[in-house]
Amino acid sequence: MAITDFEEWLANNEPASGDEAFQLHQAIEGEEPVGIYTVQRKGQQVFCQSGGGDWLLLASPAALEAFKRRVDGYCPDPDMGWEGSEAFRRAMAKGD
């Protein structure tokens, strides 16, 4: 059985770090699986799972877009966007 309420799903599967937030973003954009997140597509339906837990069913393109907007709220540096934030994080991790 899959959960269709992404707020309920996120309450139990919220990213615990910036890395996990970026992994969720990548997975939902189609770069699957990423980290603890697995995404499966069946027609217009998208299923997302975190670490073997419950599946989230995004049953329509509108539901997917709403979920993507919600996931954008986890971006650690919203002014830079996901790609800029990840590039910044990688540059800082180098310690040069």
Image (cartoon, rainbow, N blue to C red):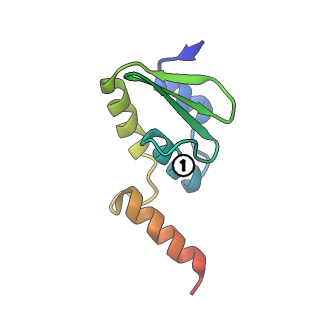
Residue at the extreme bottom of the image, as rendered: 96
Q: Nearer the viewer, residue 30 or 83?
A: 30
Quarter of image, res 49: top right
Quarter of image, res 85: bottom left
Name the spot of residue 54 as percent of width and height, x first: 63, 23
Residue linked to disc 1 = 23
Name the spot of residue 94 as percent of width and height, x first: 59, 79
Q: Considering only vertical position in the picture, is 3 above or below 17?
A: above
Total numbered badges shown on the rendered structure = 1
Q: Considering only vertical position in the picture, is 86 above or below 75?
A: below
Could you tell me which residue is drawn at 35 percent across and 58 percent down? Answer: 81
Quadrant in the picture for the N terminus: top right
Q: Residues within 10 Å of mark 1 (few under 14, many from 20)?
A: many
Q: Considering only vertical position in the picture, is 47 above or below 32?
A: above
Determine whether the residue tagged by mark 1 lies in a helix, strand or loop: helix
Could you tell me which residue is drawn at 35 percent across and 63 percent down? Answer: 80
Name the spot of residue 24 as percent of width and height, x first: 52, 43
Could you tell me which residue is drawn at 54 percent across and 55 percent down? Answer: 18
Name the spot of residue 33 as percent of width and height, x first: 58, 42
Q: Left or right: where does residue 78 sit relative to residue 28?
A: left
Residue at the extreme left of the image, as rendered: 62
Q: Amino acid at mark 1?
A: Gln
Residue at the extreme top of the image, as rendered: 1
Quadrant in the picture for the C terminus: bottom right
Residue at the extreme front of the image, as rendered: 43
